Every structure is written in C-alpha cells, then in structure tokens.
Image (cartoon, rainbow, N blue to C red):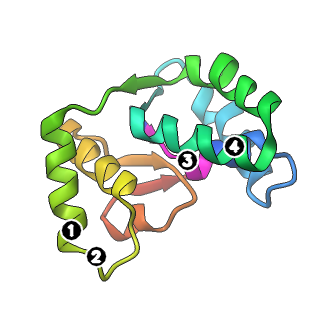
C-alpha cells in the first residue's frame, strides 16, 4: 500500500514534546515500517517541513529530518501541471482552510490513486482520504 506522508506527521516525529509524537512514532515504527508500505511525499512538503522544523526546533532537527528521516520516504517533485491544478483548486477554495501545499497533496494523491495519508491534519479526511495512525 502507498501512504502519503504530510508535514503534520513529520513534525511530531521530530519533536518529542509534540502531543502527537508517540502516535506518529508508533505508527512509523509499526505499520509504517512494513516493507510492503510505500511512503511518499512531495517536494513542497519537504520545503514546508524544513522551514517549520528549522524555525521551531533548530538546525539539529533539520539535519535529522533531511539526512535520516527523509531518505526513507519517496519524494515526488512537483511539476508544472500538478502545481497549476493545485493552484486552481486552492484559488477556488479560498474560503476554506487547506493551504496550497495541502492542495498539491490532494491532487497528487488523487492522480496517483493514493487513498491513505500519514497525517494529523483533518483536511485529508474532509477530502475523502483515510488517515493513519
């Protein structure tokens, strides 16, 4: 099974003080470590996570993310068609909460037939995706 990995799961993995840390680490160390489980994200999530972690947790946490955690996740680089589709969806929904990065995630998941997200962001469920843990 392919599972999309969101910033809302990556940040708690790197922050032991986060309320979702135990659940995130438990899922990644359990079901998320199954060799049949393909973890995937996109380049905008990498940028978003790097900025958030750097600002809140500092350089050592960024290094842990980029050198140790990220290599275990497949990264899809956002191309122009994906960016345009997500931008259109984002602009059409400005009254709602999801960010442009979230809309890229939703579009990527729909295009790739990905039904599950490793995320603590309820917007994934609102968009019709299952979330873990």
Q: Reading the chain from its start, which is encountered first: label 2 or label 3?
A: 3
Closer to us: 83 or 39 = 83
Distance of label 2 from label 4 (alpha carbons): 26 Å
Q: Which dot marks residue 7?
A: 3
Q: Which dot marks residue 94?
A: 2
Residue at screen point 24% across, 74% down: 93
Question: Magenta part of the protein: which range?
Answer: 4-9
Q: Reading the chain from its start, which is encountered first: label 3 or label 1?
A: 3
The answer to whether 83 appears left or right of 14 in the picture is left
Q: Which dot marks residue 53?
A: 4
Query: Which residue ends up furthest to the right in the rendered image?
Result: 17
Marks 1/4 in contact by CB < 8 Å: the verdict is no
Q: Which dot marks residue 125?
A: none
Residue at screen point 66% across, 41% down: 27
Residue 52, placed above or below residue 64: below
Marks 2/1 in contact by CB < 8 Å: the verdict is yes
- Mark 3 or 1, closer to the camera: 1
- Mark 3 or 4, closer to the camera: 4
Marks 3/4 in contact by CB < 8 Å: the verdict is no
The answer to whether 121 appears left or right of 10 in the picture is left
Q: Which residue is mark 1?
A: 91
Distance of label 2 from label 3 (alpha carbons): 21 Å
Tell me if residue 7 is in the magenta stretch. yes
Distance of label 2 from label 1 (alpha carbons): 5 Å
Residue 10 % position (x, y): 62, 42
Few, some or many residues within 10 Å of mark 4 (<14, 14–19, 20+):
many
Residue 113, placed above or below residue 59: below
Residue 53, placed above or below residue 77: below
The answer to whether 100 appears left or right of 45 in the picture is left
């Amino acid at each position: 099974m392919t599972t999309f990995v969101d910033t809302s799961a990556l940040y708690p993995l790197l922050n032991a003080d986060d309320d979702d840390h135990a659940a995130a680490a438990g899922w990644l160390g359990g079901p998320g470590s199954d060799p049949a489980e393909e973890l995937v994200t996109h380049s905008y999530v990498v940028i978003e996570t790097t900025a958030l972690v750097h600002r809140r947790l500092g350089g050592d946490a960024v290094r842990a993310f980029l050198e140790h955690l990220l290599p275990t996740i497949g990264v899809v680089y956002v191309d122009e068609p994906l960016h345009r589709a997500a931008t259109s969806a984002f602009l059409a929904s400005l009254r709602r909460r999801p960010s442009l990065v979230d809309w890229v995630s939703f579009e990527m998941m729909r295009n790739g037939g990905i039904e599950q997200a490793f995320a603590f962001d309820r917007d994934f469920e609102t968009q019709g995706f299952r979330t873990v843990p």
